[in-house]
Image (cartoon, rainbow, N blue to C red):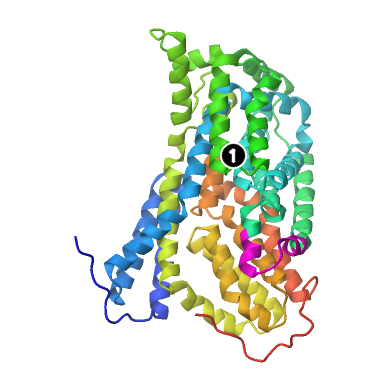
Amino acid sequence: MARDTAPTHVKEPSYADAIVPLITLTVLIGSSVFLFGTAAMDGPMQVALILCSMVVALILLKNGHSWDSIVEAGQKSLSSITTPIFILLSVGALIGAWNMSGTIPTLAFYGIQLLRPSFLYLATAVICGLISLGCGSSWTTAGTVGVALIGIATLAGASPAITAGAVISGAYLGDKLSPLSETTVLTAQLAEVDIHAHIRAMFWTAGPSFLVAMIVFALLGIKMSGLASSGYIASELSKLDQLFWITPLNLIPLVLLVVLSIRKVPASLAILFSALLAGVMAALLQPEATLRFVNDPSLSKPVAYAKGIWSALANGYRANTGIGEVDRLLSRGGMSSMLKTLWIVIGAVTFGTLLEEFHLIGKLVNPLLTRARSTGRLIATVVATAFGLNIVTADQYIALVLPARMFRAEFQRRGLKAQNLSRACADAGTVTSPLVPWNSCGAFMAVTLGVATLQYLPFCIFNIAAPLFSMLWGFTGFKIERIQSVEASPEPVTTH
């Protein structure tokens, strides 16, 4: 079938064209949350994002763009999330397999015995920070150790929402500072700055932000009340010990994942390899738990083991112990558990890509740039733009790429070193992404940790503090590095 020819005349988008999709997004997302509450993530919010994409498409058709060009932009958006799709599915399989193999139960069993409840939140943030610094991935950290720490908190009677905030705070420390992090490398490349100079600059916002987070989590731990009684915790530990053979051997899939991550094996492959190993180990080390999960006496043991592994990877592991916290810890995972998250990611990224590709975002950002006369206002504009893009485009990579591209020339013209820009982009583009429910990162964290985004958001102390410190240093001039030989000219540069 022949493709449509491009139109001879395409109109530039007006301010109304740029604003209408944002108003539509606000109204539809707000309505879905108002009507359905936390259940909005189960479909209503996804429908809202698809409708928003259709509104943008109608505006583009009105301005003379061909349907083929709109479809091509949509295809580009889908190709950009190929890696996140495989990571999401792999993490779902990993959680199911790690539950059945005893990896997560073992981490929870040892963790409850080793971690004092009053230090649980602080320890969670520090542990996740160290692991994320080592592997360079917030998603890998949250999807593995983060899940186990949520399980420990649940069994200990601590708040899953606060624990999730601590997991995310620690995970994103590494996502900002680790030279192994792809977002760290990407941000430095986009701003045209040496990666080590970028990391040194990041320390001056990431360091104080994480210090504030540790203080808050320490205080929350000290004031923590309503913990489960020691007798109840003992019964939970006893139930875990009855269901699984608790042994350090169950941690081998975790060790494999850490080794593969350090060796820079692609995240989706490393996670899936660990999941497959966990499935095999479930048959070897947890035969009773695997057969109980399959619950089909007509099958021979080898066939039952194969079915159990397959089912755990596809639909997750399920337990029925009669103890609610234990069942909630173990009955999770599977690739199928990630399908609603993929739905929201597809809708959100398509909406954001259409806004970017057809310059609707630039129409709104350029006036902000012309008003950013001081260094503080300029950095605040970068932070606001990156955070706004996380909300509107629902993709942290767009929130990193666009501000770095749009403001690079202006920073250079004003005599500001490139690491000032890269730091502001990372502080707002990377770190705020899990705070938005429909952002790919927010959706991933919610489904992986089992805590709704709006519930854990107030406790993502590091993620909230980092952009605030970035703006504070901009207005005070603290650690703002300048190119000494360059003098600022009076008029700002407008990007297109």
Query: Residue at point 48% right, 39% down?
Result: 89
Q: Nearer the viewer, residue 352 or 27?
A: 352
Q: Nearer the viewer, residue 136 or 130?
A: 136
261, above or below 440, in the image: above
- Quadrant for the N terminus in the image: bottom left
Query: Residue at point 65% right, 58% down?
Result: 185
Query: Residue at point 61% right, 67% down?
Result: 190
Query: Residue at point 57% right, 43% down?
Result: 267
Q: Amino acid at mark 1?
A: Gly
Q: Nearer the viewer, residue 152 or 433?
A: 433
Q: Which range is magenta? A: 186-201
Indicate the position of residue 161 as horizontal and vertical percent values.
Answer: 62, 42
User: Principal SS element in the magenta part?
Assistant: helix
Indicate the position of residue 411 as horizontal and vertical percent values.
Answer: 66, 78
Q: Is residue 417 visible?
A: yes
Residue 75 lies in the magenta-colored region: no
